[in-house]
Image: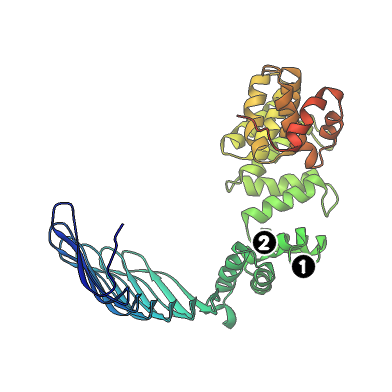
Amino acid sequence: MKVYPTDGTFPVYYESGKKAEEVTFKNGKPHGLRTQWYETGQLKSEYRFKAGKRHGKCLAWYENSLLFKESHYKEGKSHGADTVWNEDGSLWRKYNWKNGTIDGHQIKWHNNGQKQSDCNYKDGKLEGLTITWRENGSIEKEEIFKNGFLDPKEAKTGDPEAQLNAGLHYDEIQDYDKAFFWFNKGAIQGNAECQFHAGRYYAVGLSVIEDSKEAYQWYLKSAEQGHIGAEGNLGNMYFYGKYVDQDFEKAQKWYEKAYKKGNADALGHMGKIYELGYDGKTPDIDLAHDFYKMAAECESLISQQFLAELYFQGNGIDKDYSEAAKWFKKPAEEGFSNSQFHLGAMYAEGLHFEKNLKLAAYWINLARKDGHELAEQAWNLDKYRLFKYEVYLKTYKPT
């Protein structure tokens, strides 16, 4: 621990005997110049103090003698221009401060010397035009900020791509009112992605009153322009009869469009249509299995659940509890209640797993909390009584 006298200039040394720093004190506080050295003898920093607080220009160097940083302080707070260099001497960043808050022009550079970003701050918040560049010098994006919030410069002038970007930004930070405002504007102008998000907001009542007709209309407009997500969601509407009358033929139409573009969830639902059959058609379990397997291997969680259910039930194929357990696992971990229930049931009955009522209770409890009716019934069975308290108190989790 360093102990300094009240006044004067005092040195501090490394164990090797070389000077590490020299500090000037007044009334027991650093006042004036404080200098530090590397053990090699190379100058490390020069900080100026006033009554114990940094004040004025401060400099720092790399051990190779090149300047690392030049900064300015006013009574302990950053105030004025700061410049930072890389160890090879190239510029990395220039920015400005005002009474401890970043304020004014800021520029950053890539390691190859190409400018990386150019922006302005006001009272610590981004304000005005911000431009970012890739290392090859091409512009990555141009955005306008107001009071720290993203407001792409074309959004207010009607550019739908900029309106989409604004909507996506506000959606990401969960400012759903502003997100819907921009999605809706872009949707009205015919932007398929904005139409998809407008449909999504209406479908769940996010920032707007839930409206199935509006959701359907926006999904339809988006899907008619080939939007893969909207095509898949229209397929779901017709498949589950949500917002519209159940219609497997129309569901199949939209699922086919979506899965041909790479929508694995749509491929899985196509499999479900073949498993069930519709309008008097004979179920095709082999084709359903193949669709499930392809989609499941593409990380479609709903398809993994469909595949696991097929193996568990032995519907048209041999029962295989090992495969069922394998494919139920990820959907269960990601909150799919039917997978959670089936994993619980398998632990309860010793199917594939060694019987484990504690694990059974864990998974069944998760499923019932999500409204799974069979899980609720199972939870009330007496055999889980001894494990309920542990699960409720969250003192037990599977390893």
Q: Quadrant of the C terminus?
A: top right
* In-front residue for pair 16/104: 16
The residue that mark 2 highlights is 196
In the rendered image of this protein, does residue 96 appear above or below residue 36?
below
Residue at the spot x=75%, y=47% of the render? 251
Q: Secondary structure at mark 2?
A: helix
Residue lying farthest to the front in this orientation: 6
Q: CA distance from mark 1 to mark 2?
A: 15 Å
Q: Which mark is residue 86?
A: none
Residue 254: image location, x then y, percent:
70, 49
Residue at the spot x=65%, y=34% of the render? 304
The residue that mark 1 highlights is 208
Q: Where, by quadrant of the figure, is residue 174 drawn?
A: bottom right
In the image: residue 84, left or right of residue 67: right
Residue at the spot x=70%, y=63% of the render? 221
Q: Where, by quadrant of the figure, is residue 81 drawn?
A: bottom left
Which-is-in-front pick, marks 1 and 2? 1
Residue 240: image location, x then y, percent:
80, 45
Q: Quadrant of the N terminus?
A: bottom left
Q: Is residue 262 visible?
A: yes
